[in-house]
Image (cartoon, rainbow, N blue to C red):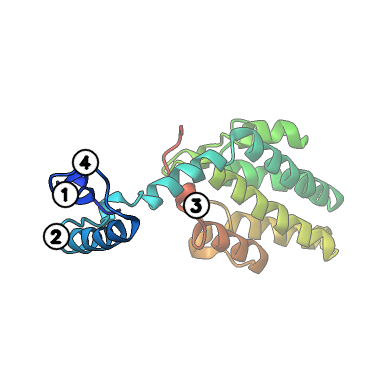
Amino acid sequence: MIRLHHFSLQKLFRRNNRSKLLSPLSTTTLMAVFFSIALQFGCASDSFDDVPDTEETASYYLLLIAPTRESALAKCIEAETVALSCTNDAGRQTQYLSAVSSHYRPASTSTVATTLCNSEIDAGVFNSPTIYTYAARQCHFECNRQFWQSQRDSSLCTSSGASTAIIHHGECSPTNWRNICQNNTFKSCLIDCFVNGTDTYFLPQGY
């Protein structure tokens, strides 16, 4: 933006000692002189101080679109529906729920996905020692869903297949996955979330 300093338009646009405006040709000439002087001596350009804080704006946007408890809960139900079905078919559902209790620390467990998730969404693992945002919880449950769906698609919902899957599931739990997660499907999904993802996953809870 150009800011012009203290020139009298009246003096420039009027003849000396007359009240008539100058002719169009003379006016054009004077305007050229006027802007030439302004550009040399009276110009103040915008600085970076005038540029919006795009990083801050982006952070607010991420907060606005961040998953809620309801959306994270829905994703948990999707994941546990597949997991409970797979382990039940394999005769390993009790073993699976014992592993969930150990690695996630929910207040209770259930063979019904909705009931299990209503407890699991607020499980101890998501609140201590690190508080997970609902975006983080939703992402973890999505990785959980992909893992169990891959077991189903690979016809591994057998006694031995589910037993191995339960071990991998524990290795890829929120507190373990960075160090001992071995399953490629689970691990690559978690890396996409928590290594390549946005800082929304690490904002304090309660936004």
In three-dimensional space, the C-alpha distance between marks 3 and 2, rounded to whole angstroms, equals 64 Å
Residue holding disc 4: 19
- Which mark is first along the chain, 3 or 4? 4
Quarter of the image holding residue 167?
bottom right
Near mark 1 (Cα within 10 A), the count class, few <14, some 14-19 or many ≥20, is: few
Residue holding disc 2: 41
Q: Residue 56 location, x and y as percent? A: 38, 47
Residue holding disc 1: 5
Q: Residue 39 location, x and y as percent? A: 21, 62
Near mark 4 (Cα within 10 A), the count class, few <14, some 14-19 or many ≥20, is: few
User: Element at badge 4?
Assistant: loop
Residue holding disc 3: 175
Mark 4 and mark 3 residues within 8 Å of each other at the beta carbon: no
Mark 2 and mark 1 residues within 8 Å of each other at the beta carbon: yes
Instruction: Residue at 35%, 49% (x, y): give it.
Output: 53
In three-dimensional space, the C-alpha distance between marks 1 and 3, rounded to whole angstroms, equals 64 Å
In three-dimensional space, the C-alpha distance between marks 4 and 1, rounded to whole angstroms, equals 24 Å
Regarding residue 132, the answer to whether it shows in the image is no
- The amino acid sitting under disc 1 is His
* Left/right of residue 73 with respect to residue 30 in the rendered view: right
Mark 1 and mark 3 residues within 8 Å of each other at the beta carbon: no
Near mark 2 (Cα within 10 A), the count class, few <14, some 14-19 or many ≥20, is: few
- Which mark is first along the chain, 1 or 4? 1
- Which mark is first along the chain, 3 or 1? 1
In three-dimensional space, the C-alpha distance between marks 2 and 1, rounded to whole angstroms, equals 8 Å
Image depth: mark 1 or mark 3 in front: 1
* Left/right of residue 176 with respect to residue 155 in the rendered view: left
| Mark sitting on residue 183 | none
